[in-house]
Amino acid sequence: MININSVYKFIQYISNKNQSGFLTPKDFNESIRQAVYEFVTKRYHNVKTQNQAGASSVGLEQNQKVTDDLRYLSKTLSNLIPRDGIINLPSDYLHLSTISYLRNMVDEEGDLNIKYVDFKVLRDNELSAMLTSSIFGKKITSGKMGVCVFRGDSLELFPKTINNVNLVYLKKPLDPVWGFDVVKGKPVYSSSKSVDIELPDDCKNEIVFMCSSYLGINLREGDLISYSETLKNQGV
C-alpha cells in the first residue's frame, strides 16, 4: 500500500516548487480522499466507454493492470445464506465483481461434481421475461440457472431456494488520513493517527497528480516525473 506520509511530503515539495503556499493537513486530507475515490472509480468503470464497440462491462477485470491496481479493494464473502432470496450488500460495498452459488452437478460419467455457478445479473425489465420463459424459467426454477436483480442495498436472487452464495465485490477504499501531532506549533506526522492509501505503490504518481489538481496545482507530466526522481534521490 501507499504510505500516506510519502504522498504528503511529495505534494508538499510540489507545492513549494510551485509557490502554492503552505499545505495544511486539512486541505491535504480532503484532497487526497477525493483523489483516491476518483482513481478507483476511473479504474473500474468509465461510463463514457460503456456504449462503445468492444468496451468491457466487467470493470474489475478489463485487463490485468486494473485487476492489479484494485487488488487491495477486492473482497470475497463465502457461504452466504439468503433470507427469502435476499442478500444484503455489505456496508463497504462499492461495485459487483461476481455473485455465484454452489451447485451439485453429475457429469457424463455419473460422478458428482460440486462447483460455483455465476448468477446472471439482470435489469428489472429483463427479469419477468426470464422467469416466464419456457426455456429459462424451468432452468431457474430447478436451480440449473441463477439470476438476480439489484434492489436498493440488496440483491434479490432466483430461485429463492438457493443457498451457499459466494459474493466477490470491490469495497469502498478507507478514507486516507495524514495524522499528526502538534509539536512547537507545527504539525508532525503520526503513523498511529494515519491511514495509508489502499492502492499499490506504483499508483503513487497518478494519485499525486490527481491530488495536486484538487489543490489547484497545475502539473505537467514531465514536472511530475522530474519531481519524483528528485525525491527518490532524497530517499522520500
Image (spheres, rainbow, N blue to C red):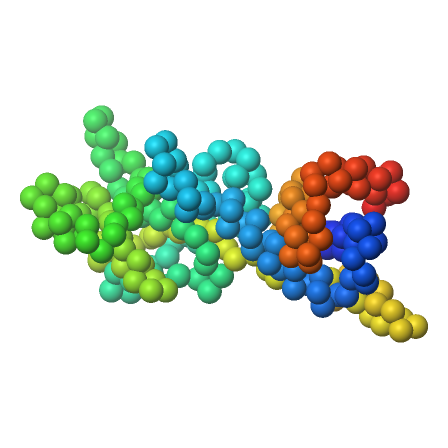
Residue drawn at (27%, 55%) of the image: 149
Is residue 42 visible from the viewing direction of this image? yes
Residue drawn at (24%, 38%) of the image: 105
Is residue 177 visible from the viewing direction of this image? no
**Extreme residue toward the top, this view:** 109
Residue 198 is situated, as x and y percent measured from the top left of the image, at: 62, 52
Residue 30 is situated, as x and y percent measured from the top left of the image, at: 65, 64
**Extreme residue toward the left, this view:** 134
Residue drawn at (35%, 48%) of the image: 99
| Count of numbered tags | 0
Q: Nearer the viewer, residue 157 or 211?
A: 211
Is 113 above or below relative to 14?
above
**200 sits to left or right of 112:** right
Is 13 above or below relative to 193?
above
**Extreme residue toward the right, this view:** 184
Residue 163 is situated, as x and y percent measured from the top left of the image, at: 29, 55
Residue drawn at (78%, 57%) of the image: 20
Q: Nearer the viewer, residue 34 or 193?
A: 34
Which image quarter: residue 4?
bottom right
Residue 70 is situated, as x and y percent measured from the top left of the image, at: 55, 45
**173 sits to left or right of 3:** left
